[in-house]
Amino acid sequence: MIKELRVATVEDLPEIIKIYNEAIADGIATADSKAVTIESKLDWFYSHDEQRPILVKEYHGRIIAWISLQPFYANLFAYRYSARINIYIDKNFQGKKLGQQFLSEALERALDYDIKTLLALIFADNLASLKLFKKLGFKEWGNLNGIANIGDLDKDLLLLGLRIKE
């Protein structure tokens, strides 16, 4: 049974990292090129709080997806109502339309987190993620041409945005 999104705990970090490392290996969803460790992501984990949490989705007690909301320019007061959103789904659960359900739930929750604008940074060749975010109302706000180099390929990074509250 798939449960509602819930706020992640540090005990969830090994499964969060497992899913993230799968994405690194795929080379399409993140600019990280080497697998990360739990220890290397502890500061990242603890940088999230009740207004910018990491949310997880469970299936039979196992985490199958996670979504992070993190500050956009954390140290600048002017951006306090903006957040960056990331979603990662276990490779065994991709392509089953779960991403839309999970992201929709996260968008609903974001309304309670004092967020007005959500931003997503997605590689132009990550067609599944682009389709997902655009289906839920995100618009392309910018294109950073060739900004990332992964596996000797220059990749465009698209900035997608969604205003969720005025």
Image (tube, rainbow, N blue to C red):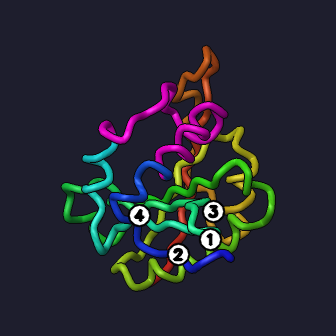
Marks 3 and 2, how far apart at CA:
24 Å
Q: In the image, what residue occupies the spot 68% across and 77% down?
A: 1
* 3 or 4: mark nearer the eye: 4
Whichever of callouts 3 and 2 sits on the residue coming sooner in the sequence is 2
Q: Judging from the image, what secondary structure is the residue with disc 4 in?
A: strand
- Give, as a three-letter code, the residue at label 1: Phe
Q: Which residues are magenta?
A: 16-40
Q: Which residue is mark 2?
A: 5
- Residue topped by disc 1: 102
Q: Is 106 on the left or on the right of 64, as rendered?
A: left
Tell me what residue is drawn at x 46 percent, y 67 percent: 55
Please provide percent x and percent y for residue 56: 50, 66
Where residue 64 sits, quadrant-wise, is bottom right
**Residue on which the image places disc 3:** 139
Measured in 3D between alpha carbons, the distance from the residue under mark 4 to the one under mark 2, in whole angstroms, is: 10 Å
Q: Is 110 one of the magenta-colored residues?
A: no
Amino acid bearing label 2: Leu
Q: Earlier in the sequence, mark 4 or mark 2?
A: 2
Up-down relation of residue 35 to residue 4 (above or below): above
